[in-house]
Image: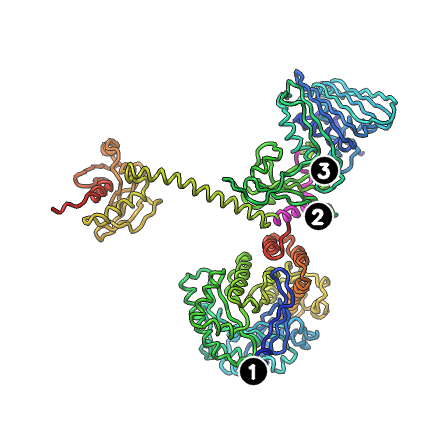
Amino acid sequence: MTENVVRNRFDFDVTARNGDARTGSLVINGTELETPNLFPVINFYAGGTDNSVYGGGIHRTLKEFMIGAERVGVEPMTEYFDASMTSVASLTDYNLNRNRYESYLDTPIKQRPLFENYNGLIFADSGGFKFLGGTDIDGSDFEVEMNQDAVYDIQEAFGSDIIVNLDHPIAPDDSHATRVEKAEMTAENIHTFLSISRGFDGAKYLTLHGYNYSMMSEFLEVITDSVPEGVLKEGFDGIALGSLVPKKDDRDALIRAVTDCREVMNEWGIGHWPLHVLGISSRAVPILAALGADSFDSSTHIHNAINGKYNESLMKRVDLDDADFSNCDCPVCSSDLLVNRMRGNAEYQKDVLGPVAMHNLVVVKDELAEIRRRIQTEDEDALIAYFEETFSHDKTMRQYAHKVVNQTLGGYF
Amino acid sequence: MKKAPKVNEVNEFLEIASDFEDPLEVIRESLSNAYDAGATTVEITILNRAGGSDIIIEDDGHGMNERDLESFFDLGNSRKTDSIGYKGHGTKIFYKSDRIEVTTVHDGTSYRAEMDEPWEKLNNEVLPEYELTKTDVRSGNPGTKIKITNFRSGHGFDAESLTYNKINHYLKWKTIAGSTAHYFDDDQREMEISVVLDDEIDDTQDGLVTDNRLTFPDEQLDPDDSMYPAERMCKHYPANEIAVEYDGGKTTLQIVGMVGGKAARNELPTYGRHSAQFGIWFAKDHIKVERLNEAISHDNEFIHFLFVANCQDIELSANRESIRNKASSVYKAIEEEVEYYLSKVTQDPWFKSYLETRKEAEYNRRTAKQQTSLKERRETIESDGFIPKNKAEVLIALERASSTSRGLSHTVEDYDPTADIHAILRQNGRLRNAAVFPTLTGLFENDVPLKNTDVAVCWTQGDPAILSEYERNGYYGGDLKFDVDDGGFEYENDGRQFVEVIEVSELLQGAAVPAADD
């Protein structure tokens, strides 16, 4: 009986392979997600008013799209929110007081009437990069000392589907000693995490930090000094590869990290686990998917919108003023109301830029759907053709695309 | 009132003919014309003459009619459309001679055109004329024979410089004889090209026979066991036709090429240095025109490449040595396409392994060289002992002397060879500023300021006569006084300064002698 519960709680099946890329089905508590896929970053909680669960600038408008609120005049865009990434640290974004904090956590997200239309997977990051990354953000606004126990309580209170342990991300200029120290501290958290999360109904991902094979291998060795390998493998369901945000523009580094991570996972006998790459932006996603990453999270669609950028495609962004909405048939650009708003005719900036962020997200999600289709053909030429179409004349990206074609798809010659 | 600008015909002929300088361009021109005339054989004969040479070109093409002959002699009146020569400039090189004779049989008619003293007349501002006669002949056996008498180059053309070797390499590098068309079209007509030189020019062989195909050296994908294992490595990159869209139209780019080491490249004909020859070529009619080596991003890597990127929408300058329409959108589009294609080649794992093999071989050669050099250095130490050759070695010697002698206490705390005061020493617990030189004389030769110098560390004092001269002549307006017994020198200039001299060779010698404790 217990075994059945465990099996239903989490399941990940690889359904097709193409080179190192793979499509899969991630099933958590009966909700299925096709991979590779993107978890858009969503802050489910915002300011300090009664309706603030709904609030939060562009986040608010995105949530309106997600649930199909009357204000945006479109049907719920659930297919683009089949997964979402939120962070425990997002609670710190709006200076919450203790009362608000408690009211936010008294009902899981998906059980709130406001989000009844939402049925995607929620991945709750531990916020380690914020709490422990040397910034002065902590839980003092709402009088909570942020440690592994507190973080897990919040993740659970969110009603999360996927959670990670509280980690200590590394930085590119960390010394060896610092990296080992951070791994040791993370190991302590893992120990705590595994003991307090035994009854968790969802998937647990182990955060892994390192930029190459040796760093990741050493990280796991340090972890298994305090948590036996068997316990680790029993306790976790997937890998969340972290610390890559400072390297997000160094494509070589990203390729190496994902390639080496897959190698380490295979050597540790966890190659069948899903691999999530934390915080990676849209343009690198196809390359990393081709190398075998199964999911990503990103807020790039929002940041681009805030910077006035409209995605014509995954690779091409134009200034919002130059965008031709008639070239796009997404639900946002097909709505006269929303196009009018994107042209600047709205009282609030969130209603101008929110639809742009939603459109940008649609572009990336559609792109991932296309990548999945190409992988499912199991024909290497289909993925090569995708890379040709996507990166062919982008001088900044093409050498990395060539590298991936050579590394995993048999090369050109 | 509208007025039409006028052209000075004579000057135009002179100008265009002068653009073609190299007598080999006569051959280049004739071969292209022969191919366009459907020829399967072309024979070229060059005879030495007092002021230049006679050049005879004979082909079995379909010949020229009267209209074609007009184009042959006219300027800017070609009947070609997009192939090389459509401007009608090339044959004007023949005007740089004493006589042009063209005999051509086309469609049952034989035409003969003769032009006397074309070059002299043009230089006398007279437009030369040609005499055309026409005779009916039996159909069959068409062809053209062109005889250029006493061809002159503007800069004292010397026919003897035209060796078979030079002509062969020129043909393959600059003319249709080096065409890469056959990689794209199995039906490309083969043309046999023979060249015969007067014995006075080159008697090393009876003649030269070649075809109109540039072929790459055989592939060798793996390194060999030689000292330069990548030298003969070679990979072909198959013919690739790419449809290119540009602002205003569509065109086709045909790329074929190879990557190879020096030995492989040497199997190709060469025309000049490798660095001036290999790389990425744009071509028209599959004849190389101008390089785009920027398509290969890394330093000098283009030398390993020979790629020919052909596009018929390239337009050539009048002398055919460069591309004229570089500002056009079609050029920009194909340039981008070539760069993209080459980006794939440079990311090809084979190419990376080729470079890696070269690097490994270089590493191994360096190791071998090191062994030789180290052997010599070790022998020198064994025979002559340790003699510092630079500042760092002086400091090594100082530390060694200190470590082997109980009476000395010198440690090097800091070393900056680019500073005036190179090192900071700890001597008996105190920090001291030290200028360091293999010889003391070096300190003065390098104009080291003395105010902040506590100690001069040197292997030996150096030439005492030089030091005496400094003592005699002074140093930066001050007086120097060397006092060996006091272990240093005094410098007086707005105050008195004593600089200790540590002569390390003596310290080390002293330290090396076993302490006598009896």
Q: Amino acid at mark 2?
A: Ile
In this view, the residue in front, A222 or B433, is A222
Q: Position of residue B313 (x, y in %)?
A: 72, 41
Marking on residue B417? none
Residue ranking furthest to the left: B518
Residue under pointer 1: A2
Q: Tell me if residue A356 can be seen.
A: no
Residue under pointer 3: B285
Please name the residue shown 64% across and 23% down the image.
B205
Please name the residue shown 66% across and 55% down the image.
A388
The answer for which chain carries disc 3 is: B
- Rendered view: A56 above or below B418: below
Q: Position of residue A47 (x, y in %)?
A: 55, 77
Q: Position of residue A221 (x, y in %)?
A: 45, 66
Does the residue at mark 1 contact the one at mark 2 (Cβ under 8 Å)? Answer: no
- The part of the image, by quadrant, that contains residue B317 is top right
The answer for which chain carries disc 1 is: A
Circle 2: element type:
strand
Q: If you read the primary sequence from the N terminus, does the residue marked by circle 3 or circle 2 appear first?
A: 2
Q: Amino acid at mark 3?
A: Asp
